[in-house]
Amino acid sequence: MPDIIVIGGGPGGTAAATRAAQLGAQVTLIEGARLGGNCVNNNCIPLTALLGSVELFRRIASAAEMGVRVGPATLDLPAMLARKDRIVGELREGLAGLLPTFGIEIVEGAARLVDARTVEVNGLRLAAGRAIILATGARAAPDPAGVAGLLRADEAIRLDPPPGRVLIWGGGAAEIEFATLYAGLGVGVILAVDGPYPLPEEDYEIGQRLQGVLQAQGVQVLTGVRVQSAARSGDGVVVTLAGAKAERQAAVDRVLWLGRTPNIHGLGLEELGVKLADGGVVVNDRQQTNLPGLYAVGDVTGRPFYSSLATAAGLVAAENAMGRPRRLDRRHVPRYAFSIPEVAAVGLTEDQAQDQGYDIEVVNVALNGNARAMGLGEVEGGIKLVADKQLGKVLGVHIVGHRATELIAEAALGRQLEALAEDLAWAVRIHPTLSESLQEAARAALESGLAESLRW
């Protein structure tokens, strides 16, 4: 009898399984499709691999400015796709080889819960001595009514072939990433955002910067609109968009819609009385469901659908399942989009901080004055810091710029440690580095409106 049964072999499930095994558990991991889940096979990994090719192509186009002479560069799409598939395959094979080294048993098949400690898979019943951890991710949501010509994520990432003109419905991180990729491949892209700017849940200045970046790359950004219908017309699709003032139409080849919903299908959760909300499993900050011994992690618990959050939740669930109390504070989880340049944020936006009653200090630092950014030829974007004016506490950090997803790690750690702007200002950085811009923002906050005792 295994101590822990994990259902799902994506980032959350593999993290939970390996951590439980490290803590001495006998672990069985059940996967109904392919190891790695949506992240490795259909989303994060293949998408960033393709974006890496597009980013390099863009940099080669400006090589002469950096004193490098090269011939005309072209994108070799079959080679890009072969590289993407090779990376995905290597990671998937790596998981298949790594998990057994922890003593983890891998079972292929679709699992259904019999009770909070028993599953049925391949016609057999398997009981868990300690706990079951659900990590079944998310699946494609049903197609919206009245919309023809839909392109879904698994097809979109294959680029077989890429459409000549596409309307991307939505302004979230994945939509931004596909818009960046498709525009880089020369596809005509319309981004239809039901909000005032791309990434409408992020800080308004970040959204406005990002909108400018996308438009400069040839993306037509429409804000404050929603797709009302899409009807086939010849070989293409005519999309009707409803806005605040009037309707408008756009003629495209396909409509890319990335709607996803927590994957609870076939698990038998409702029959067992597992509490659900908005289609996902409800958990507390220890990833426990309302049934003792049953945990859930990652996309199956609902938005946001971040593989990094799934990994963190998997580790927390494993620790608790093994009797080591640990909590996940979602306030400190970084948010991101792999656009070019990247977007990353952690903590409160300026508006959220004000709504929560903070007296705030806000500082913006452009990257075009950063020595390392100038040397790299990557000066687009900036860093925004939001701090509590009275205590100097860092409330939020928001970045658009080269390797923003790496830069945000320092801010995320600072948030977790309840860092003050003073802490960020006095920590010594290597010179020249991009990270100095975060230090510059913290210094500017200290020099301006923070409490007198916190100034230089």
Image (cartoon, helix red, strand yellow):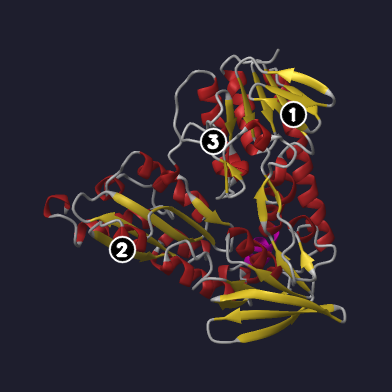
Q: How many marks?
A: 3
Amino acid at the residue labelled 2:
Val
Say whether residue 6 is left or right of residue 302.
right
Say which residue label 2 marks: 363
Say whether residue 387 is left or right of residue 308.
left
| Mark 1 and mark 3 residues within 8 Å of each other at the beta carbon | no
Main SS, magenta region, reads helix
Camera-nearest residue between 91 and 157: 157
Amino acid at the residue labelled 3:
Ala
Q: Quadrant of residue 340?
A: bottom right
* Distance Cα–Cα, label 1 vs label 3: 18 Å
Say which residue label 1 marks: 30
At which x and y percent is residue 183? 68, 71
In terms of secondary structure, where does tag 1 sit? strand
Q: Quadrant of residue 160?
A: bottom right
* Distance Cα–Cα, label 2 vs label 1: 48 Å
Q: Is residue 103 magenta?
A: no
Give the magenta part as a residue range.
Answer: 53-59
At which x and y percent is residue 446? 22, 56
Reply above or below: 263 against 359.
above
Q: Earlier in the sequence, mark 2 or mark 1?
A: 1
Q: Quadrant of residue 71?
A: bottom right
- Please indicate, yes or no, whether residue 189 appears anywhere in the rendered image: no
Reply above or below: 452 against 117.
below
Q: Residue at x 75, y 36 (%)?
A: 35
| Residue 393 - label | none
Q: Residues within 10 Å of mark 1 (few under 14, many from 20)?
A: many
In terms of secondary structure, where does tag 2 sit? strand
Give the quarter of the figure containing the N terminus: top right
Say which residue label 3 marks: 313
